[in-house]
């Protein structure tokens, strides 16, 4: 199974290629009142809601990577840079959302 | 075109976020005076720790014979919205504090400055208020 990787700050994310929908620049993300710490907010893409996740990383990138999830809700994460593809996840990869993993740099 | 009451919602701003309430629950919208700012008011600014905006209005809801007041910075008006455009919010974004959020809808009105508005579930507002009041009494 192939993974697309992307960088935000010193974090590397791995995104399941089969789930990749698109990239959007500077998505408009609205805060969700009193939501969980790992949720940045909600946005929209072609009439579908996109739940944007976040980590402790303080510098959100400008590129929104959108992943398929439910029929009417997509998942997203903000990144600074798109990197290459990998075949396997690192052992220490942590799942953030379906199809989205974080692998930290040392 | 007829407007059906089921498709009518009150749109207001509270704590920096935009909210929608089915009009059938709304009893009154009034100016918020010093006497009316009681502890029995649901205040998004306070809950979201947003200082600054002044809540000039109270939206009074009626539910099962009980009244609930929400503080609002602005009341933008009554919107006719297609229920099928709402996206139900999933567990991933909900927790014990914000279960009053039922769904989200994208703003399609160019006159408004926001992207998303959240549909409120009045029964959860009640429950959350009661829980908060109980904690305050302890």
Image (cartoon, rainbow, N blue to C red):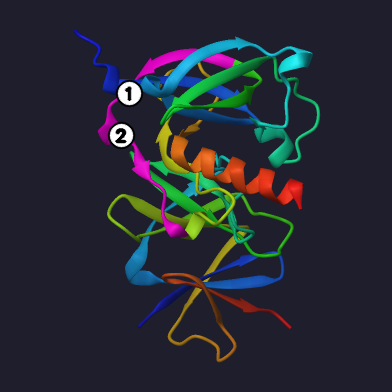
Whole-percent x and y of residue B37?
73, 22
Residue toward you, A60 or B53: B53
Pointer 2: what residue?
Answer: B85
Residue toward you, B115 or A60: B115
The answer to whether residue A39 is seen in the rendering is: yes
Query: Helix, strand or loop at disc 1?
Result: loop
What residue is rendered at 69% in x and 41% in y? Answer: B47
Whole-percent x and y of residue A101?
52, 74
The answer to if B82 sits in the magenta stretch is yes
Q: Residue furthest left?
A: B1
What residue is rendered at 38% in x and 79% in y? Answer: A2
Q: Quadrant of residue B82?
A: top left
The answer to if B48 sits in the magenta stretch is no
Q: What quarter of the picture does the N terminus of chain B occupy?
A: top left
What residue is rendered at 60% in x and 61% in y? Answer: A38
Whole-percent x and y of residue B22?
39, 25
Whole-percent x and y of residue A15?
46, 70
Circle 1/circle 2 CB separation < 8 Å: yes
Figure check: B1 above or below A102: above
Is B101 left or right of B82, judged from the image as shown?
A: right
The answer to whether residue A32 is seen in the rendering is: no
Q: Which residues are magenta?
A: B75-91
How many neighbours does mark 1 have within 10 angstroms: few (below 14), some (14-19), or many (20 or more)?
Answer: some
Figure check: A82 above or below A87: above
What residue is rendered at 41% in x and 23% in y? Answer: B25
> Could you tell me which chain the residue with mark 2 belongs to?
B
Pointer 1: what residue?
Answer: B81
> Could you tell me which chain the residue with mark 1 belongs to?
B
Is B128 left or right of A57, judged from the image as shown?
A: left
Report how far apart the C-alphas of labels 1 and 2 lie in the structure: 8 Å
Residue toward you, B87 or B9: B9
How many neighbours does mark 2 have within 10 angstroms: few (below 14), some (14-19), or many (20 or more)?
Answer: few
């Amino acid at each position: 199974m192939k993974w697309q990787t992307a960088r935000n700050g010193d974090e590397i994310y791995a995104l399941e290629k089969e789930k990749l929908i698109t990239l959007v620049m500077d998505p408009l993300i609205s805060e969700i009142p009193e939501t969980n710490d790992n949720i940045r907010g909600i946005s929209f893409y072609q009439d579908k809601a996109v739940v944007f996740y976040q980590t402790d990383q303080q510098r959100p990138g400008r590129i929104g990577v959108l992943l398929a999830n439910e029929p009417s809700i997509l998942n997203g994460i903000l990144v600074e840079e798109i990197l290459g593809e990998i075949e396997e996840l690192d052992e220490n990869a942590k799942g953030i959302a379906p199809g989205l993993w974080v692998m930290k740099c040392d | 075109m007829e407007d059906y009451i089921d498709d009518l919602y009150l749109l207001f701003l509270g704590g920096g976020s935009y909210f929608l309430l089915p009009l059938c629950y709304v009893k009154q919208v009034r100016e918020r005076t010093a006497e009316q700012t009681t502890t029995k008011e649901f205040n998004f600014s306070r809950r979201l720790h947003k200082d600054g905006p002044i809540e000039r209005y109270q939206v009074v809801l009626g539910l099962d014979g009980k009244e609930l007041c929400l503080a609002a910075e602005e009341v933008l008006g009554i919107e006719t919205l297609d229920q099928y455009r709402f996206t139900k919010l999933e567990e991933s974004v909900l927790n014990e504090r914000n279960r009053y959020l039922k769904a989200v809808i994208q703003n399609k009105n160019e006159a408004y400055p926001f992207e998303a508005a959240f549909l409120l579930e009045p029964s959860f507002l009640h429950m959350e208020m009661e829980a908060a009041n109980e904690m305050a009494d302890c």
